[in-house]
Amino acid sequence: MAGPLETAKKALRAFAEKDRPAIEAVIGEAYSFTSPLDNALSRETFFARCWPNSEAFTEMTFIQGAESGEWAFITYEGVAGGKRFRNTEAHRVRDGKIVATEVYFGWNIPHAAKPGGFV
């Protein structure tokens, strides 16, 4: 069985590649999705609300990842709707299935502030 980090990478690749059967295979029935815009969405609501956003993704590059116990942490850069951005996600994996995802939105690339500056 794949570890938490590899399981989370499979889900993110499936999202970027718009491969719903692949992502359904790694998301558990008892699933919770949380982001700055979503609070503990169920698996059903995730697929209704969030899955359609996969259509806007044209690129995803993994920057770094780590795992601790049943948690995987991934930072990636993506392109959606023509805009490049960086996010970090935490995924809790049990028995080879993701049971919780927390998304932390990053910033646009290039950053709106000049190096050493702020917005």
Image: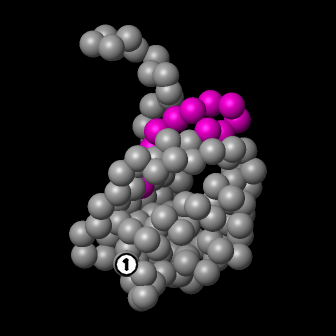
Quarter-wise, where is residue 46 in the image?
bottom right
Asked if residue 25 lies in the magenta stretch, the reply is: no
In this orientation, which residue lies closer to the viewer: 30 or 61?
Answer: 61
Pointer 1 residue = 3
Residue visible at 49% across and 22% down in the picture: 110
Residue 84: x and y in percent read 57, 32
Residue drawn at the location 32% of the way across and 70% of the way down: 71
Residue 55 sits above or below residue 108 on the image: below
Magenta span main SS: strand
Q: Residue at x 29, y 67 (%)?
A: 67
Q: Is residue 85 above or below residue 68?
A: above
Q: Is residue 15 visible?
A: yes
Residue range corresponding to the magenta coloring: 79-89
The magenta stretch spans residue 82: yes
Q: Is residue 49 visible to the viewer in this orientation of the structure?
A: no
- The picture places residue 53, in percent across and down from the top left corner, at 69, 50
Q: Is residue 4 above or below residue 33?
A: below
* Residue drawn where x is 53% and y is 69% of the image: 10
Q: Nearer the viewer, residue 37 or 102?
A: 102
Horizontally, residue 44 falls left or right of residue 34, namely right
Relative horizontal placement of residue 93, taking residue 82 as reference (left or right): left
Q: Amino acid at mark 1?
A: Gly
**Residue 86 pos. (x, y %):** 46, 39
Q: Quadrant of residue 114?
A: top left
As rendered, which of 32 and 56 lies closer to the eye? 56
The quarter of the image holding the N terminus is bottom left
Q: Nearer the viewer, residue 54 or 6?
A: 6
Q: Position of residue 35 (x, y in %)?
A: 48, 51
